[in-house]
Image (cartoon, helix red, strand yellow):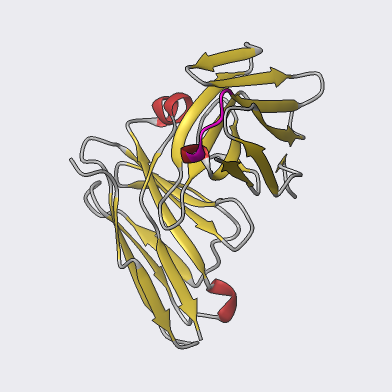
Amino acid sequence: DTGVSQNPRHKITKRGQNVTFRCDPISEHNRLYWYRQTLGQGPEFLTYFQNEAQLEKSRLLSDRFSAERPKGSFSTLEIQRTEQGDSAMYLCASSLDGRQGGIYGYTFGSGTRLTVV
Amino acid sequence: DQQVKQNSPSLSVQEGRISILNCDYTNSMFDYFLWYKKYPAEGPTFLISISSIKDKNEDGRFTVFLNKSAKHLSLHIVPSQPGDSAVYFCAAAKYNFNKFYFGSGTKLNVKP
């Protein structure tokens, strides 16, 4: 297993366009998380899945954002009608379960850098 | 509302000396604390963790200290090596581990 994979690595889009990012977690990991990181800040929680169920969403996740994990494997994060404030690094992470992730940390992907122009 | 704070954006130390990175938190409900290291163009990688029932955890050159009464934790790296140069994030979670709250990071530069 090659770890958590995120695609694309970079995305430049015009304001108002829709974008979709993909995350492939470690195959046996049941938990999948999305975080967002802006310049000079630490990662901020967006949402997490336990298998295919989305169990928590941050208030940062406005109605323009939607995330899915249809078969409990890969996940997608879609942003509709992008705004300049959406420019950030979007990080995906996975863990075997909550407790394992808490004690031994998540495995993060390298992120997708979104630039909205 | 930043519940985890790292007040030093950067730190520079000489190779072989001790690096001390600090982190403060406000929520007494946090149960677990982790440190992550991040190199440019990569995702954060887990470094070391500590439970709220302990005050110290050691792993090789890395030691994390927790002072619950002061709501403060620190990461000690001894001896520091140039390869330790990276951004270090502290993070905290409640008992259910549903999410982590991250600090804003400290950029460590270890000079040869």
Q: Is residue A39 visible?
A: yes
Q: How far from the left and from the top, in percent, is residue B9?
A: 70, 49
Q: How far from the left and from the top, in percent, is residue A99?
A: 43, 25
Task: Describe residue A73's horizontal placement relative to residue B93 as left or right.
Answer: left
Q: Please determine whether, in this image, residue B39 is positioned above or below residue B52.
A: below
Image quadrant where one finds the N terminus of chain A: top left
Q: Please determine whether, in this image, residue A65 is positioned above or below residue A110.
A: below
- The majority secondary structure of the magenta stretch comes to loop
Q: How far from the left and from the top, in percent, is residue B36?
A: 51, 37
Residue beneath the point at 47% across and 30% down: B47
Look at the image and give the residue range highlighted in magenta.
Answer: B78-82
Looking at the picture, tell me which residue is in the foreground, A101 or B56: B56
Residue B79 is one of the magenta-drawn residues: yes
Looking at the picture, tell me which residue is in the foreground, B92 or B43: B43
Q: Please determine whether, in this image, residue A21 is positioned above or below residue B81.
A: below
Residue beneath the point at 30% across and 68% down: A8
Looking at the picture, tell me which residue is in the foreground, B88 or A27: B88
Residue A57 is one of the magenta-drawn residues: no
Name the quadrant containing residue A18: bottom left
Outermost residue to the front? B112
Residue beneath the point at 39% across and 60% down: A67
Outermost residue to the right? B70
Q: Please determine whether, in this image, residue B1 is positioned above or below residue B66.
A: below
Outermost residue to the left? A1
Number of labelled discs? 0
Task: Describe residue B39's horizontal placement relative to residue A39 as left or right.
Answer: left
Q: Is residue B30 visible?
A: no
Task: Describe residue A18's horizontal placement relative to residue A30 as left or right.
Answer: right
